[in-house]
Image (cartoon, rainbow, N blue to C red):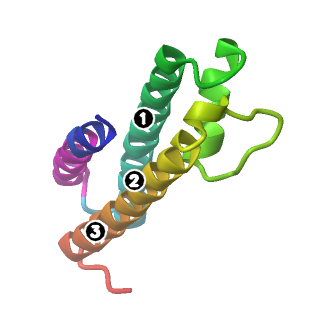
Amino acid sequence: MNIAVHAVFTVVMVRTVRRDAERLSQPNVVFREVLIMIIAAAILMLAHLIEVWIWSLFYRLLGVTPDSSADFDFAFINYTTLGYGRLVPEAPWQVLGPMTAMNGVLLFGWSTAVLFQVLAVSARRFGIRY
């Protein structure tokens, strides 16, 4: 599910960036680059929050944490590969922590690649060389 969410948000982000890059005026190229990167990063961050929420729903359905009110917190900790702190999953579900972390690493890498591509494409469009 998270890969599908990330794919949809990536497509939306790329289309939004293309549209906004074409609408913005030419004279203020630096402002345009900054605005495009802010829009792209904000859309991808929203995707990551939704993906954490999906993991937390999955945790709640399975009863992964001793206290279901901490599912979102626990999902966020795992997704960002921060590691266990005060929360530890119930014994039969301990493998879900590393699986969530693996998913988070994959999707963070995907986001990084997409942000780099957005920067490169918009820079070429505006004639900027890095």
Q: Position of residue 58 (x, y in %)?
A: 45, 24
Q: Residues within 10 Å of mark 3 (few under 14, many from 20)?
A: few
Q: Locate the C terminus and report the quarter of the image it occupies.
A: bottom left
Residue 84 is labelled as none
Secondary element at tag 2:
helix
Q: Nearer the viewer, residue 9 or 129?
A: 9
Task: State the image coordinates of residue 103 (x, y, percent, origin top left).
Answer: 43, 50
Task: Please say whether residue 10 is one of the residues in the magenta stretch.
Answer: yes
Q: Which residue is mark 3?
A: 117
Q: Is residue 63 left or right of residue 45?
A: right
- Determine whether 36 is above or below 56 in the image: below
**Disc 2: CA contacts within 10 A as few (<14), some (14-19) or many (>=20):** many
Q: How far apart are labels 3 and 2 at the CA level?
A: 15 Å
Residue flagged by tag 1: what amino acid is it?
A: Glu
Q: Which residues are magenta?
A: 9-25
Mark 3 vs mark 2: give the one in front: 2
Amino acid type at mark 2: Leu
Q: Which mark is residue 107?
A: 2
Point out the tag, 1 or 3, that comes first from the N-terminus.
1
Q: Residue furthest front?
A: 92
The residue carrying mark 1 is: 51
| Coordinates of residue 70 in the picture (x, y in percent) | 69, 21
Q: Earlier in the sequence, mark 3 or mark 2?
A: 2
- Is residue 84 shown above or below 74? below
Q: Nearer the viewer, mark 1 or mark 3?
A: 1
Give the side of residue 50 with respect to residue 93, left or right.
left
Q: How many marks?
A: 3
User: What is the C-alpha distance between the residues marked 1 and 2?
Assistant: 9 Å
Q: Are marks 1 and 2 in contact (CB under 8 Å)?
A: yes
What residue do we see at 33% from left, 38% from top?
A: 2
Task: Of the two numbered discs 1 and 2 on the same chain, state the one appearing first in sequence.
Answer: 1
